[in-house]
Amino acid sequence: MKDQKPKIWLSSPHLGENEFKYVKEAFDTNWVAPVGPHISRFEESLSLFANNQPVAALTSGTAALHLALILSGVGPGDYVICQSLTFAASANPIRYLGAIPVFVDSEEETWNMCPRFLEEAIENCLKGQFKTGASESYSGKAKMPKAIIPVHLYGMPANMPEINKIAGKYGIPVIEDSAEALGSTLNNQFCGSFGEMGVFSFNGNKIITTSGGGALTSKNPEFVQKAKFLATQAREDAPHYEHKEIGYNYRLSNVSAAIGIGQVEVLPLRVSARRRNYDLYKENLKEISEIKFLPEPEGYYSNRWLTTVLIDGSQNTIDREKIRLALDEENIESRPIWKPMHLQPVFQNFPFVGGDVSANIFRLGLCLPSGSNLENSHIEKVVENIKQLFH
Ligand SMILES: *Cc1c(COP(=O)(O)O)cnc(C)c1O
């Protein structure tokens, strides 16, 4: 039954008209390798969405975060402060390096890193005393954290002015996880360009895709240069293969970059289509008081990568799981909000600073189908199915 209904995806790839042309160029010129002219073209076009900062194209957002942490000098036993409400890829690279993630709760206004808890987390690092996600205590060395990773979740910018102010006070570099926020701005500045370094992702479900890929940007061109160097096996400038450092195979392929050039061309259209999805859901579900949307604070402009709602009503018998399952019956894909890292079995013994803001967002939150290729009739169908449950 269910499988006979047309699938409505959460967020599926949406190609424009030129991607295939650029891929064909790559084939025709035989640049089917992790070097080639499309890589630098892709980097230049991306730079326009990173406040004209230089960009390094990489194999994934996760790889970009890994390199950003290496470039920040993170090593075994160091503290790295990370937003708890996020996808696991924000935190995993901290563990690749044997460092200790210190998870920080969210604020209600953006769902992103709470500046107040951030400062508390830094102070706890300086004492070496914490609680953990499992509400036990964690004690480690008293020292300054090496990096701070805020995330612009679902495209909504984090409070970068406050986060940068606190980071600056302690001299800690900020690595912005902007994987979900390409094209989002805060006070007319693009996300990814606020921190020491910023990271983007072009995985299949992101706002634009190269089938798989990522990028690192920085206002410091040396970081970007060094990221490219480390991403190509840290090969020194010599006719033979000379290595003074450990390298990685993280450079994006020229074929993927060719897809990326076409995708960046349509990025502004993708942002407006996703924002329109949000507006349509909000307008059509406004009578249901139990469904709450996250508005943009003044100066914030979200790419609305995914439209997210909280199902919140005290005498409510309909919860987010009921809605998710009902939609699933109709072959409509929706998904709970990311489960906070401090509640994940793999991270629960690491430090956590905060309260229950992110835990509540996870408990109540649902991501609705949000692709830029959705038609009005798809959104209407999702809305109808949700409305039925509340009647
Ligand atoms: C997708 C994503 C990543 C990882 O990007 P990949 O390209 O899939 O490795 C990191 N952080 C967040 C918040 C993401 O959504």
Image (cartoon, grey):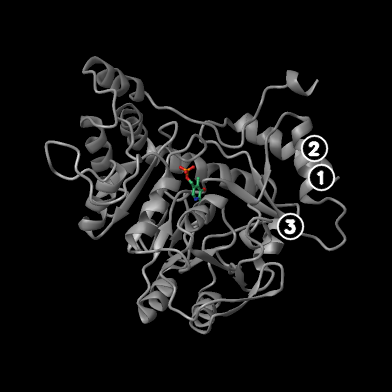
Residue 31 sits above or below residue 313 on the image: above
Q: Position of residue 273 (x, y in %)?
A: 49, 39
Dot 1 alpha-carbon crowd within 10 angstroms: few under 14, some 14 to 19, many 20 or more: few
- The dot on residue 275 is none
Asked whether the residues under the numbered discs 3 and 2 touch, taking CB atoms below 8 Å apart as contact, a structural biologist would say: no
Residue indicated by mark 2: 326
Amino acid type at image mark 2: Ala
- The mark nearer the N terminus, 3 or 2, is 2
Dot 2 alpha-carbon crowd within 10 angstroms: few under 14, some 14 to 19, many 20 or more: some
Element under label 2?
A: helix
Gap in Å between the C-alphas at discs 3 and 2?
A: 17 Å
Element under label 3?
A: helix
Q: Quadrant of the N terminus?
A: top right
Amino acid type at image mark 3: Arg
Q: Position of residue 17 (x, y in %)?
A: 36, 23
Q: Position of residue 66 (x, y in %)?
A: 41, 52
Residue at x-position 38% and y-position 80%: 170
Element under label 1?
A: helix
Residue indicated by mark 3: 363
Residue lying at the far top in this picture: please name it: 28
Residue indicated by mark 1: 322
Residue at x-position 58% and y-position 69%: 107
Dot 3 alpha-carbon crowd within 10 angstroms: few under 14, some 14 to 19, many 20 or more: some
